[in-house]
Amino acid sequence: MFTGIIETLGEVKKIRKEGENLHFEIGSSLAAELKVDQSVAHNGVCLTVVEVSPASYTVTAIKETLDKSNLYDLSVGDLVNLERAMIMGARLDGHIVQGHVDETAVCSKIEEEDGSWVFTFKYSSNTDNITIEKGSITVNGVSLTVVNSRKDEFSVAIIPYTYKNTNFKDIKLGSSVNLEFDVVGKYVKRIMSGY
């Protein structure tokens, strides 16, 4: 379980293919504090730490994860948003994030608004995922509030702190991002549509 509050950025140091799996070595200041079997969210994708060294650690993504996320597009040198699992009893500064990406979206518009930015993302019309204005959405692991919600599209406002301290600064028109829709909204939608 995560909160969507990014702790730091990590850098992809190596990518190794094994069958349909990809192993990512991530350089990060968090590495010295991690241990094997811990969960860390990478651009919002919960992955298990399988190896640790003082300056980096390795995680593995299986085909299912690669099919539903933008991890397959990562290259050596790319920056990823990192968050360790939340501590029970601590403040929930973002919202409840599972680290299970629902789908990817494409950045369709970026507007600079006198010191902040509004990013618009389009996602597949073939899914039943929804956003609501002032509701929560996770984009590349970042907990955000939806500004505008339309069918298969939404916008979020990004403050300078978030822009500087996450990989939002690297998102351009056409960039693919990971989306995790609000878990409460998913349950309500499921109840309303019946089982």
Image (tube, helix red, strand yellow):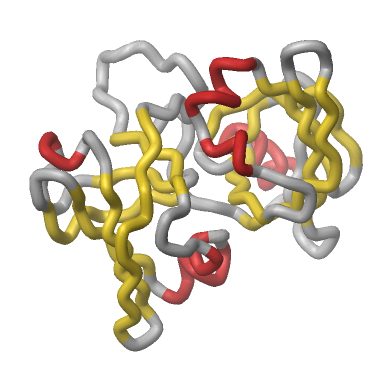
Q: Nearer the viewer, residue 153 or 181?
A: 153
Quarter of the figure that contains the C terminus: bottom right
Coordinates of residue 57 in the picture (x, y in percent): 20, 53
Q: Residue 138, located in which quarter of the rendered image? A: top right
Residue 6 in sight from this viewpoint: yes
User: In this image, 36 relative to 5: left or right?
Assistant: left
Report the residue that reaches farthest toward the right. Answer: 150
Q: Residue 92, located in which quarter of the rendered image? A: top left
Residue displayed at 75% across by 53% down: 106
Q: Which of 22 and 150 is in front in this view?
A: 22
Coordinates of residue 113 in the picture (x, y in percent): 83, 17
Q: Residue 22, located in which quarter of the rendered image? A: bottom left
Q: Which of 16 and 188 is in front in this view?
A: 16
Determine whether 65 is above or below 117 in the image. below
User: In this image, 138 relative to 37: left or right?
Assistant: right
Determine whether 155 is above or below 145 in the image. below
Determine whether 57 is above or below 119 in the image. below
Residue displayed at 50% across by 20% down: 94
User: In this image, 66 relative to 84: left or right?
Assistant: right
Report the residue that reaches farthest toward the bottom. Answer: 19
